[in-house]
Amino acid sequence: QVQLVESGGGLVQAGGSLRLSCAASGRTFGAMGWFRQAPGKEREFVSARSFSGDRINYADSVKGRFGISRDNVKNTVYLQMNSLKPEDTAVYYCAAQRFLTNQPYPDPRNYDYWGQGTQVTVSA
């Protein structure tokens, strides 16, 4: 059974940092990444990374502030978030593809598995 379990969310002041983790189990995955959804808004792409890390994709809104990494031994993907802004407030979701896809697409329809989400709140 496939499971993606996020952790690391919380409340932080603007300018602060958080590190999200997503522990995956049940199979070998292709690209893994992060999406977020703020209240009243659609789910949006944040970042994704291929299995080997040779392809990495970031949303323009987080470039230079967020970094995605992956430990394939632990089957875990991380999102280091620095210089956080109030507009980063959202529920952050981990997403994963079947192994053969393995492309860090920004469209959530290209992802097969999802975590339950973790809340990130950035205060002004």
Image (cartoon, grey):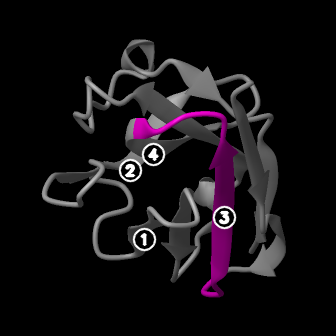
Dot 1 corresponds to which residue?
Answer: 66
Q: Is residue 102 left or right of residue 33?
A: left
Residue drawn where x is 65% and y is 87% of the image? 16
Give the amino acid type for the residue marked by disc 4 in the picture: Gly
Task: Please state which of residues 123 and 46 is positioned toward the viewer in this rendering.
Answer: 46
Is 109 in the magenta? no
Give the amino acid type for the residue marked by disc 3 in the picture: Ser
Give the amino acid type for the residue marked by disc 1 in the picture: Phe
Residue drawn where x is 36% and y is 55% of the image? 61
Q: Mark 3 or mark 1, which has the lower sequence index?
A: 3
Closer mark to the observer between disc 2 and disc 4: 4
Q: Which residues are magenta?
A: 15-29
Residue 29 shows in this picture: yes
Q: Mark 4 or mark 1, which has the lower sequence index?
A: 4
Q: Is residue 21 left or right of residue 31?
A: right
Say the numbered circle drawn on residue 33.
4
Dot 3 corresponds to which residue?
Answer: 21
Q: What crowding class fits label 2: few (fewer than 14 Cα within 10 Å), some (14-19), or many (20 or more)?
A: many
Q: What crowding class fits label 4: few (fewer than 14 Cα within 10 Å), some (14-19), or many (20 or more)?
A: many
Q: Mark 4 or mark 3, which has the lower sequence index?
A: 3
Q: From this view, report whether residue 37 is shown above or below residue 57.
A: above
Q: What crowding class fits label 1: few (fewer than 14 Cα within 10 Å), some (14-19), or many (20 or more)?
A: many
Tell whether label 1 touches label 4 (CB within 8 Å): no
Residue 75 position in % (x across, y down)? 55, 56
In the current view of this chain or complex, which residue is farthest to the top? 109
Q: From this view, report whether residue 16 is shown above or below residue 123.
A: below
Dot 2 corresponds to which residue?
Answer: 47
Tell whether label 1 touches label 2 (CB within 8 Å): yes
- Quarter-of-image position of residue 1: top right
